[in-house]
Structure formats: C-alpha cells, structure tokens
Image (tube, rainbow, N blue to C red):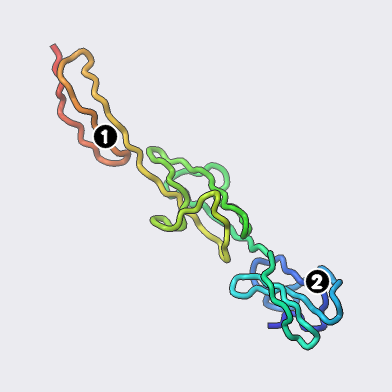
Amino acid sequence: EDKGGSNLKGYLVTTSSTAPTSDSSWTIVSSSVSSKTVKYQIKENGTYYIYAIDNAENISEKKPKTFWVKSTVTYDPNGGTLSGSNSYVLTNGEKYKTPTPTKTGYTFDGWYTAKTGGTRITSSTTVNLSNDQTLYAHWTANTYTIKFNKNGGTGSMSDKTCTYDQNCTLPSNGFTRK
C-alpha cells in the first residue's frame, strides 16, 4: 500500500497510535533521502514498518520501526481502593506500572488481565498493546486465628482459624470459673 508515492522524499512519521487513513496523516520530518528512494512508515497488522521505495514504487526494504504505540491502561481495584490515578498512558516497550491497592480484610494478589483468572501482570512485564486495556486487582481473603483466654478460669479451648468475610462458628465455651 502506498501512502505517499514516489513524489514524496523523506522520512515520514505519524504521531497517531492508529494507522493513517490518507496521505495527509503523514508528516515529512526529513528530506535528506536520495532522489531514487522514498521512505515512509505504515502500520500493518499492529506493527509499524519503514519502507524504502524506489522511483518505480518497488519495495526495496521493509524493516520494523521502533515506533511505540501508546495505550491507556486502567486499573480496576475490584472492590478495593486505589489512591492516586487509576489509569496511565503507557508506551509499548516500557514496563507496566503496578500501583498497590488496598481492601480491608484482604491481601493484594496482583494485577490480572481478567476479573477472575487471566494473566498476571507485574512491574517486570513489558507493555505490548494495540488497544487500551483494563487490569483487575485480585485479592486473597485474610485468615485470622482466634485464641481463647481463660482469664483466671480452668479448662482449655483450641485456637480457631477464621477467614475474613466468611461465617465462622465459634466453639462452645470450654472454660469454667470458680
């Protein structure tokens, strides 16, 4: 596909993260190309390429260009709270931001690509998107151990472990007091 023809000379780039729809979407930023070569950039299957075209409009070179697409990544705390921004504009090739949300009674288990299940995204995961994305916080309910104190009485009672937000049946009182 020709986005400029042999009458354009120079390196052509676009600041848009979407593929151009017309020649007017392109901007010449350099004209130091020989008269036999026209170079331009076009998005093809989600990847930006630089093409070198001769005057007969034959492609003589096609190489991926380091043109990073920017996408908005939104962080859904999934019932928790996120202080600060809940979305960031990230550029392909950089690492994900991983803010830490909070949720009473739960431990944050990480950011995932789905509300349940999905792929875990960490601060070492490289951004490689063609569209905006929502990441979801996953949580693990905290468990608590209840220890019973006879407070001067006699008898014994085993500790009881309970999970936050779950019903927890306490054992009958095993202590006596004189």
Res. 125 image quadrant: bottom right
Q: Is residue 125 left or right of 152 when viewed as pictured?
A: right
- Name the residue tied to disc 2: 28
Residue 166, given in percent of the width and then of the height, sits at: 28, 41
Q: Residues within 10 Å of mark 2 (few under 14, many from 20)?
A: some
Residue 63, given in percent of the width and then of the height, sits at: 69, 72
Relative to 51, is 174 above or below?
A: above
Alpha-carbon span between mark 1 and mark 2 = 68 Å
Quadrant assignment for the N terminus? bottom right
Relative to 45, is 157 above or below?
A: above
- Name the residue tied to disc 1: 161
* Residue at the top extreme, as displayed: 178
Residue located 18% across and 25% down the image: 157
Residue located 40% across and 46% down the image: 139
- N-terminal-most mark, 1 or 2: 2
Quadrant assignment for the C terminus? top left
Q: Amino acid at mark 2?
A: Ile
Residue located 39% across and 55% down the image: 116
Q: Residues within 10 Å of mark 1 (few under 14, many from 20)?
A: few
Relative to 38, is 116 above or below?
A: above
Q: Is residue 168 left or right of 34 when viewed as pictured?
A: left
Relative to 54, is 115 above or below?
A: above
Q: Amino acid at mark 1?
A: Thr
Q: Is residue 156 left or right of 97 when viewed as pictured?
A: left
Residue 46, given in percent of the width and then of the height, sits at: 60, 71
* Residue at the bottom extreme, as displayed: 56
Residue 84, given in percent of the width and then of the height, sits at: 57, 43
Q: Is residue 41 left or right of 116 when viewed as pictured?
A: right
Res. 10 image quadrant: bottom right
Res. 68 image quadrant: bottom right
Secondary element under disc 1, as helix, strand or loop, is strand
Secondary element under disc 2, as helix, strand or loop, is strand
